[in-house]
């Protein structure tokens, strides 16, 4: 089989097909499409709408459509007495802080639940400390407990590369082995998503040659462009019923342009935007109290000086 991560780089999602029939997953039929869904593609529409609220994320939007189409067609094949294939849906999310990895994992957990792939659809987000123990045997026990909680949903491991931190002798290796075993074990019903910085994740996968093929879906979450960040600003403000003056818009844009460049690797993208918006809202409130202006126009408007990037409490990363 082709290295799926390599295939991904060529702009294609390489999904591994196995020959196991769908019913071997042990998932019931209760979440399968109803006739109504068959006609309307209701679930797909709903999730596409939800994803449309987010800026960019084109790869994710494509992936959701692909998984939907595959499951839908499987259903049609089943009705015709044709073989249906099972796919491996474990994923790698690569990207810098605040690029939407956790948000997307949560949406995918819900989506897979509604599509009948996952029985519960919750997401269990963990990191190295939740998996790795302090003495021999402790790690396998901790990891198994985490797996138990994740059953029926998505297990999301943030900064997954840190599991390889200490090399062969480190207990992180034991956690990886336990996870791999669970992925092969038919009794488990979960989707594993490993997330982390792009470079570190590539290195991590290169250290564990058995791993890449177990994660056929790799999605890049690139840093957002200045225009995309500005679009987030606009959406977040509209949602909260605020407006920026022209001067404030230019001020924020200039700032984002600079900071994206200066803090390239640690800049926290969407999270930073949310934080500066929330801070500006607080600053506006303080200003309005000081000015004693409470009319509708004043309440709606955020001005240039409501963004105090230099004396801000908001961290860039
Ligand atoms: N494309 C987007 N459109 C709108 N908001 C976004 C987008 N991407 C991220 N955000 C917002 O940015 C914040 C951070 O996103 P999230 O926690 O999913 O990032 P992350 O990649 O998991 O970060 P980290 O690696 O630091 O855990 C959230 O409030 C999210 O709603
Ligand atoms: Mg996250």
Image (cartoon, rainbow, N blue to C red):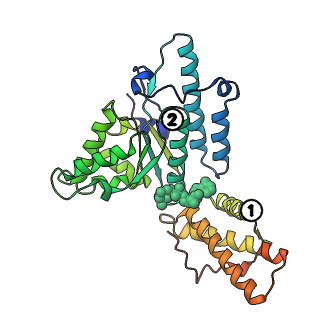
> Which tag is nearer the camera, tag 2 or tag 1?
1
Q: Nearer the viewer, residue 40 or 2?
A: 40
Q: Is residue 23 left or right of residue 282?
A: left
Outermost residue toward the left?
Answer: 136
In this rendering, the answer to whether 286 lies above or below 76 is: below
Residue 173 seen by the camera: no
Residue under circle 2?
13
Q: Quadrant of ligand 1?
A: bottom right
User: In what element is the residue under mark 2?
Assistant: loop
Mark 2 and ligand 1: say if the CB distance to the nearest ligand atom is below 8 Å.
no
Please tell me how crowded label 1 is: few (under 14), some (14-19), or many (20+) other residues with Cα within 10 Å: few
Q: Is residue 209 left or right of residue 60?
A: left
Please tell me how crowded label 2 is: few (under 14), some (14-19), or many (20+) other residues with Cα within 10 Å: many
Q: CA distance from mark 2 to mark 1?
A: 34 Å
Residue under circle 1?
238
Q: Nearer the viewer, residue 136 or 23?
A: 23
In this rendering, the answer to whether 250 lies above or below 18 is: below
Residue at 51% x, 12% y is 82
Residue 258 seen by the camera: yes
Task: Give the quadrant of the N terminus.
Answer: top left
Q: First in sequence: mark 2 or mark 1?
A: 2
Outermost residue toward the top?
Answer: 81
Give coordinates of residue 297: x percent, y percent.
84, 75
Q: Nearer the viewer, residue 170 or 225?
A: 170
Give coordinates of residue 285: x percent, y percent.
70, 80
Give coordinates of residue 55: x percent, y percent.
65, 52
Give coordinates of residue 147: x percent, y percent.
33, 44
Dividing the picture into quarters, in which one does residue 299 lie?
A: bottom right
User: In what element is the residue under mark 1?
Assistant: helix
Dividing the picture into quarters, in which one does residue 35 lie?
A: top right
Residue at 26% x, 43% y is 178
Outermost residue toward the bottom?
Answer: 290
């Amino acid at each position: 089989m082709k290295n799926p991560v390599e295939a991904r780089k060529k702009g294609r999602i390489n999904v591994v097909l196995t020959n196991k029939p769908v019913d071997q997953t042990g998932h019931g039929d209760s979440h399968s499409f109803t006739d109504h869904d068959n006609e309307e593609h209701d679930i797909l529409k709903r999730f596409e709408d939800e994803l449309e609220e987010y800026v960019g994320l084109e790869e994710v939007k494509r992936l959701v459509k692909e998984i939907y189409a595959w499951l839908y067609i499987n259903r049609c094949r089943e009705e015709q007495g044709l073989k249906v294939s099972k796919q491996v849906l474990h994923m790698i999310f690569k990207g810098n802080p605040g690029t939407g990895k956790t948000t997307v994992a949560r949406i995918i957990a819900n989506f897979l639940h509604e599509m009948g792939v996952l029985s519960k659809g919750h997401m269990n987000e963990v990191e190295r400390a939740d998996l790795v123990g302090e003495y021999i045997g402790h790690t396998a026990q901790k990891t198994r407990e985490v797996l138990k909680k994740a059953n029926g949903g998505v297990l999301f491991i943030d900064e997954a590369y840190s599991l390889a931190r200490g090399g062969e002798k480190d207990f992180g290796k034991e956690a990886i082995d336990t996870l791999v075993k669970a992925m092969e074990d038919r009794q488990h019903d979960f989707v594993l998503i490993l997330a982390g910085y792009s470079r570190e994740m590539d290195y991590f996968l290169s250290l564990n040659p058995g791993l890449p093929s177990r994660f056929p879906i790799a999605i890049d979450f690139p840093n957002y462009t200045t225009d995309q960040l500005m679009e987030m600003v606009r959406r977040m403000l509209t949602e909260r019923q605020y407006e920026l003056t022209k001067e404030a818009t230019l001020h924020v844009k200039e700032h984002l342009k600079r900071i994206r460049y200066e803090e390239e690797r640690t800049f926290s993208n969407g999270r930073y935007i949310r934080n500066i918006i929330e801070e500006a809202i607080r600053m506006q409130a303080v200003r309005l109290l000081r000015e004693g202006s409470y009319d509708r126009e004043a309440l709606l408007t955020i001005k240039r000086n409501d963004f105090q990037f230099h004396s801000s409490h908001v961290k860039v990363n």
